[in-house]
Image (cartoon, coloured by chain):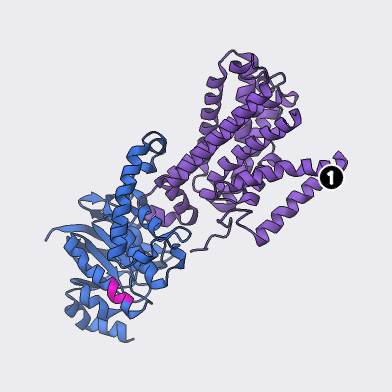
Chain colours: A blue, B purple
Amino acid sequence: MTSLADTRSLSKHFNGVVALADFSCAVAEREILGLLGPNGAGKTTLFNVLTGLLAPDSGSADFKGQALIGRPAHRIANMGIARTFQNLRLIRRITVLENVLLCFKNQPGENLFNVFFRHGHCKRHEAGIREKARVLLKTAGLSEKVDDLADNLSYGQQKLLSIVCCLATDADLILLDEPIAGIAPEMSERILAIIADLPNQGKSVIVIEHDIDALKEIAHRMIFMDAGRKICEGTPEDVLNDPRVIEAYLD
Amino acid sequence: MDYVLHIGVLILLYATLAVSLDLVVGQCGMLSICHAAFFGVGAYVCALGSVSTTVPSLVLWVGAMWMAAGVSVLVYLPARRLRGDVLALCTFCVQVVVFSIFNNWGDLTRGPLGVPGIPMPDFMRDAQKPQLVLLLLSILVACVTLFVVHRLVKSPLGRIFRGIREDDVFALSLGKNPIRSRAAAFGVSAALAALAGTLYAHHVAYVDPTSFTVTESIFMLSMVILGGAGSLWGPVVGAATLVLLPEVLRFAGLPPVTAANVRQMVYGLAIVLFMLWRPQGLIGEYAFGREAKQK
């Protein structure tokens, strides 16, 4: 089992509150890792550290053998890590299609010189990603919403769109922060099916989710964390039968 | 006839300024109050170059554009982490500093005396009706500006502009560099303002610092907001409306002294009313300053 990303002894404090304490984990290629834990356990902090939005106090993390800590967020994203956000970040005042188009990496038309002096090249590339974006949206069942403003989608559709956005970046590691929290059952099934299929496309996933039943369906492995520490780790059955996990979730 | 030509050139130059300012304000969502400074850089480079050197006009214009773009990127980089009101305040300071340089660097700019006797561009000194040729040039410049802004807005780079207008963190998480995109917008916008400045210098034949004050910057911003930020034609409509307004007041029979004051009142009132009831401007769609607030 080759590991795609590793973290070693990550620690992070916010004004004395522990968010991550000596946290180490690894995610393998084509693996779905479920991250479980009460609110404030440091799950989202881990995502923020991995994507470069937060600098840890200590510890290291690497991805495909390259160090992540200290690298600017946009560089990390370009290495192949994509994420969704708990409080759903999308560009609301542009269309669904534009949101997806925005996500494609290394577009020649993002360079000022190319926009004016290599217009043909930009246009051809744009036509290509437009086609890909439509296919992605169709697969996700959002074909009819292509030209709607992202703001006009339902909450579930917005969550779905944010996952489509991750797919458009063609990242190898996708971090999903509560992908099905607070949405209708049909929609969450659709989203779970998409997530479960990601390893078949060669992608690894780390999912934060409070819906244990849903999580154990898709996760290959689970980590339970509390107060920034890893409490236990293993197959979904092992973790969910662990007395410490049962205690935390029954409390 | 000359009067109509004069108003025509003014509308076109202000349309150029407003459209280029909208690239920063409407597309990127950065409130900039220093557009008149870049306009002034263009005007001064052209004025001083035409009066005291024999550099061809076209070279001067291109030089002015590069210089304004350079200045804008240079002042943006230290301010790159700023957003919203703080960035607006920062651009306000840039405006004040640039004005002070025009006003006080006597050896270079002749200070408050200004630069008189700016000739027409060298390639049209033999023209029968230079003012008419200048009008045609202004039309050309306005069209070039509309083309440049349109091309940018429709490009993937324009998409990043609209992305970072709302959410930097999302753009970062997608691997886009918001600072670079903003610097590009600032640079292009300043270069186009400088181009308008060069034509302005040729048109009025005399530049002095009072043409490039904070008031001028706010005037340009009002054009964008009134016309419709974030739309291509909105700023053009705004520019035409605000340039024509005082002329209409004049024909309404108000004495010039009263007209000047009424004009200020009308601007102020119009902006307040627009921000309250029609933040998207006359023909725009993007409601300026009404972004979805996110944590």
Which picture quadrant has residue A207?
bottom left
Quadrant of the rendered structure where residue B277 is? bottom right
Q: Indicate the quadrant containing the N terminus of chain A: top left, top right, bottom left or bottom right.
A: bottom left
Query: x, y (%) of residue A53?
Result: 38, 56
Mark count: 1
The secondary structure making up most of the magenta span is helix
Instruction: Name the residue: 62% across, 33% down.
Output: B39
Q: Classify mark 1: residues with Cα within 10 Å, few (<14), some (14-19) or many (20+).
A: few
- Tell whether A53 sits left or right of A140: right
Residue A7 at what x, y percent from top left?
Answer: 24, 59
* Magenta highlight range: A187-191
Query: From the viewer's perspective, is residue B214 above or below residue B47?
Result: below
Chain name for mark 1: B
In this rendering, the answer to whether A8 lies above or below A70 is below
Q: Please provide percent x and percent y for residue A187.
A: 33, 75
* Viewer-side residue, A113 vs A227: A113
Disc 1 designates what residue? B252
